[in-house]
Image: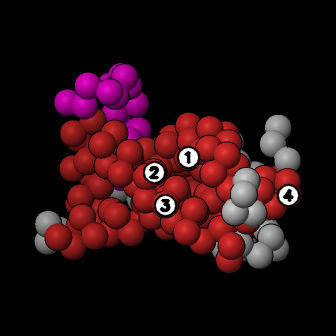
Amino acid sequence: MIDEKLLVAQLKNPSTQEAAFRSLMSHYKERLYWHIRKIALNHDDTDDILQNTFIKIFKNINSFNEDSKLFTWIYRIATNEAITFINKRAKNTHVDISELQYKMAEQLQEDNLYSGNEIQIILQKAIATLPQKQQLVFNMKYFDEMKYNEMSEILETSVGALKASYFHAVKKIEDFIKKH
């Protein structure tokens, strides 16, 4: 377990910032990678988004006001970076965001770094059909086993709204899987 308050103090101190940032990256890199990967689906895109996330954290650490946990703040940045990336990709390719995400899920089978089986591909396709907010909520609850109050801080949404989003996401995924 990492002492977030100490780490934040070290990140804000120019003489300890570099070592503290390496520690932060070491501690959060894998978890953030998999969170972003569930949104971006592609390894190379995920690496780019993760790098942008850490750059943004480094540049903005002095504006972190410590009203929330460091973990929550970092996760929010990673989530926003991933969503921004996907939205830009959809805009640049002139396709609807849901169409882009479905195509990305279909391409998982050709991804050498994806080790999922047929059922996992179908699940990813089902998730890709959900609205973006439901995708996030489903991934954070189902895969990351995150508590609703943590998701509420990260996504800046009420717990009740998150529970409703998760419920609707699960129903839509079940319906998709039954059809396929």
Q: Position of residue 5 (x, y in %)?
A: 85, 57
Disc 1 to disc 3, C-alpha distance? 13 Å
Residue type at numbered disc 3: Ile
Q: What residue did someone put label 2 on? A: 50
Instruction: Judge the density around disc 2: few (<14), some (14-19), many (≥20) Cα neighbours within 10 Å.
Output: many
Q: Position of residue 4 (x, y in %)?
A: 81, 53
Which region is colored magenta? 109-128
Q: What residue did someone put label 1 on? A: 32
Residue 165 vs 158, above or below: the answer is above
Q: What residue did someone put label 3 on? A: 55
Q: Secondary structure at mark 4?
A: helix
Disc 2 to disc 4, C-alpha distance? 23 Å
Q: How many marks?
A: 4
Residue type at numbered disc 2: Leu
Q: Secondary structure at mark 1?
A: helix
Q: Earlier in the sequence, mark 4 or mark 3?
A: 4
Q: What residue did someone put label 4 on? A: 5
Q: Residue 125: tell me if it is visible.
A: no
Disc 1 to disc 4, C-alpha distance? 20 Å
Q: Residue visible at 43% across and 59% down?
A: 52
Query: Between 146 and 167, which is closer to the camera in this rendering?
Result: 146
